[in-house]
Amino acid sequence: MVIIVVPSFEKGSPFSEQLQRTLDLARASGVADLVIASDGSIPAMSGIGLITFSDRYALGSAISEFIHSQSASKVASSHVTIVSAEISSLSNSSAAMQRLIAAQAPLSYIPTFHGSETVEFPGMNDAGFIASQLVQDIQPETMIPAVGLSVARALLDKVGFACISLSGLALELVVECFSRGEEVQLIDSDLSVASDFAPVQISNDELARGLRRAVELIAIEELFPAHAWDARRPESTMSCYHRLAAKFIRLGDFESADSCLNQSDRIAESPRALALRAVIAMERGETLGAIAKLITSLQEYEQQKRNASVSKLEEGAGQPIDSVNEELKQGLSALNSQDNSAALKHFARAVREFDSFYRESGLLTLM
């Protein structure tokens, strides 16, 4: 079975021509069971199945449900090939289609390039999948190589994927495969010489979904192996959840960020968690709540430094410096003048000057 993903369709458009070429490619490769997945704009075509994903985050689950609905005789192969209609734009598209159809790994994909650089899935490199690299690689505006996938039916049968694009589906499949200890295979790299297909910039929502799935399925020690887990497990756990929270904040997933902070709070409350909650409040437009959290955070940073007998929980937090004191002074002055917006800016600057974590986590533009 070959499933061709077409986000939208307009008869006579260049994209409709790509769809027809992709259908011809699949037929030329000997595939009789063809399915088109779209937003409902594809008209009925004789002998071709249709999957409609009209709701947000429905592509993966729609494909999974369609596979479930097919009898064993209808889908005889152990694998399903899922491609973008744009695969036909590759100069070696016929070879790409044939190799995807023949692939036998749990998950296989076609390499793509951006300029001269290979675009990989987050967490993937020449050595395979590295969980710690996944967290590092997932950033706003990440690109995903989603030209074509070969997926084991067993993987699609068991998991309902709530994603909206082929890129989002691909990211969740990579995470699923790693969590199960299954292979992710790059289709022969000689295909890449003709890969003029532009990598897809995946949405922040889908990146957050992929990261959230990784946190659910993969042990935190594997996501952050560089920490001193044997010697300082509580502190390491807190630090990792703070970093995950910062990542989710950057992706706009405040609910997941708050969930990570709740995990860290189970070990101990910390000034960093308070400051991160202040950033969430800032992003939600809750100015007074953000100010209150920042002030409390700064007080706790100060207390943590005064109490030399307490193990330092916030690696990267430094001693108060003149710039911090000046920001505090100006923040209090603005607060007394009821200039809440200015007060928020000054208190946020004081926190980020106090602790290098916010700079290292890419939160400076939000504070």
Image (spheres, helix red, strand yellow):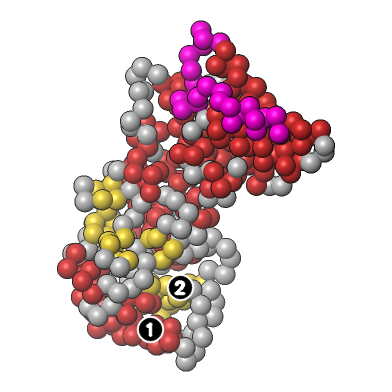
* Residue at image mark 2: 37
Q: Secondary structure at mark 1?
A: helix
Viewer-nearest residue: 166 or 340: 340
Pointer 1 local density, CA inside 10 Å: few below 14, some 14–19, many at least 20: some
- Tell me which residue sits at (42%, 49%) in the image: 138
Instruction: Name which residue lies at 72% across and 42% down.
Output: 342
Q: Amino acid at mark 2?
A: Ala
Disc 1 designates what residue?
Answer: 18
As drawn, 11 above or below 305: below
Query: Where's residue 193, x and y in %?
Result: 21, 71
Q: Are marks 1 and 2 in contact (CB under 8 Å)?
A: no
158 in relation to 28, above or below: above
Residue 190 appearing in the image: yes
Secondary structure of the residue carrying tag 2 is strand
Q: In x, y percent, where is residue 216? A: 45, 40
- In the drawing, does residue 11 fall left or right of residue 87? right
Magenta range = 307-330
Q: Which mark is residue 123?
A: none
Residue at far bottom of view: 12
- 74 is higher (above) or lower (below) than 124: below
> Which is nearer the N-term, disc 1 or disc 2?
1
- Furthest residue in direction right, as rendered: 337
Count of all numbered marks drawn on residues in the image:
2
**Is 311 part of what is drawn in magenta?**
yes
Q: Residue 332 placed where, x, y %?
A: 74, 31
Q: Is residue 275 left or right of residue 64?
A: right
| Residue 75 visible to an observer of this rendering | no
Q: Residue at x 46, y 28 (%)?
A: 316
Residue 252 located left or right of residue 102: right
Q: Quadrant of the N terminus?
A: bottom left
- Who is closer to the viewer here, 11 or 343? 343
Q: Is residue 283 above or below residue 316?
A: below
